[in-house]
Image (spheres, rainbow, N blue to C red):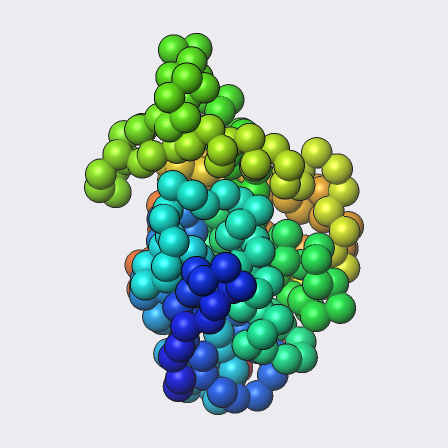
């Protein structure tokens, strides 16, 4: 296993961890305000190492150990971070695993690199969340604050209030994927908890409807929350990725 820092070209460095092994390479894309040290990322890395599978995980700018400020980030910037890490640190076929916002980044990655992304796994995938789950749920007063001040702090059950910037919302509109067919021909697996308080599980159905691939399967966990990081949730993730790596799921 090797770790390093990747200059994306503007003196902002992205922290990454890579383990060598056979292809396809698993790439883990964290969620909004999450990083590569979480239970799902670390657990998947251990799973890959046990199999001798190549894997890359990294932190977006403004997240985890990477440089840059979180408030400067947008969907477009974080998607570009993902492409920079993939293009410069991996070769060959990829299985992209995206958690929450990482599911949106995974779709954008698959669209941008259709020749390389052979399979995509979404864990409580949240494409278009800046519009559907943030802007659309704001009160008129909150929208006015966001527009005037450039940032709105909303309560979070995971810790300190979450700062939402006007730039994040406006940039997100340039990267919406659910308003038209999603051109992806590979295998897609969507895992979602039906007790998810943050991203409605019905969004998985919308993704399946929009993607052009016919090889799409959805696994719903009735009592699963947004994180899906309990031992049995992680076991489902490993089985899902394993089945994509070798069709018998061994």
- Please indicate, yes or no, whether residue 32 appears anywhere in the rendered image: yes
- Place of residue 122 in the rendered image (x, y in percent of width and height, measured from the top left): 54, 55
- Please indicate, yes or no, whether residue 243 appears anywhere in the rendered image: no
Q: Residue furthest top?
A: 140
Total numbered badges shown on the rendered structure: 0
Q: Residue furthest left?
A: 159
* Up/down of 9 relative to 167, above or below: below
Which residue does the image show at 58% across and 69% down from the upper left? 86
- Place of residue 133 in the rendered image (x, y in percent of width and height, measured from the top left): 48, 30
* Up/down of 127 relative to 243, above or below: above
- Place of residue 87 in the rendered image (x, y in percent of width and height, measured from the top left): 62, 71
Work out whether residue 204 or residue 159 is closer to the camera in this orientation and state it. 159
* Up/down of 246 relative to 185, above or below: below
Side of 169 where 173 appears, left or right: right
- Place of residue 248 in the rendered image (x, y in percent of width and height, measured from the top left): 60, 79
Which residue does the image show at 22% across and 38% down from the upper left? 160
| Quarter holding residue 159 | top left
Work out whether residue 81 or residue 17 is closer to the camera in this orientation and state it. 81
Which residue does the image show at 67% across and 67% down from the upper left? 117
Which residue does the image show at 57% across and 46% down from the upper left? 76
| Quadrant position of the N terminus in the picture | bottom left
């Amino acid at each position: 296993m090797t770790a390093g820092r990747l200059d994306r070209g503007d003196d902002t460095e992205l922290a990454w961890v890579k383990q060598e092994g056979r292809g396809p390479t698993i790439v883990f894309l964290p969620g909004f305000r999450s990083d590569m040290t979480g239970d799902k990322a670390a657990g998947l890395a251990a799973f890959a190492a046990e199999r001798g599978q190549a894997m890359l995980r990294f932190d977006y700018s403004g997240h985890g150990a990477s440089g840059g400020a979180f408030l400067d980030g947008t969907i477009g910037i974080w998607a570009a971070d993902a492409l920079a890490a993939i293009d410069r640190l991996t070769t060959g076929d990829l299985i992209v695993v995206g958690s929450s916002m990482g599911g949106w980044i995974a779709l954008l990655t698959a669209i941008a690199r259709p020749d390389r992304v052979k399979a995509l796994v979404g864990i409580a995938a949240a494409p278009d969340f800046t519009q559907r789950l943030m802007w659309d749920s704001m009160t008129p007063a909150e929208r006015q604050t966001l527009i005037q001040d450039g940032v709105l702090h909303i309560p979070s059950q995971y810790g300190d209030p979450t700062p939402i910037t006007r730039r994040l919302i406006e940039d997100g509109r340039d990267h919406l994927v659910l308003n038209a067919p999603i051109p992806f021909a590979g295998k897609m697996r969507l895992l979602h908890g039906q007790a998810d308080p943050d991203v409605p599980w019905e969004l998985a159905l919308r993704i399946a409807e929009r993607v052009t691939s016919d090889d799409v399967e959805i696994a719903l966990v009735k009592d699963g929350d947004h994180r899906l990081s309990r031992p049995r949730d992680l076991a489902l993730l490993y089985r899902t990725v394993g089945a994509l790596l070798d069709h018998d799921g061994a």
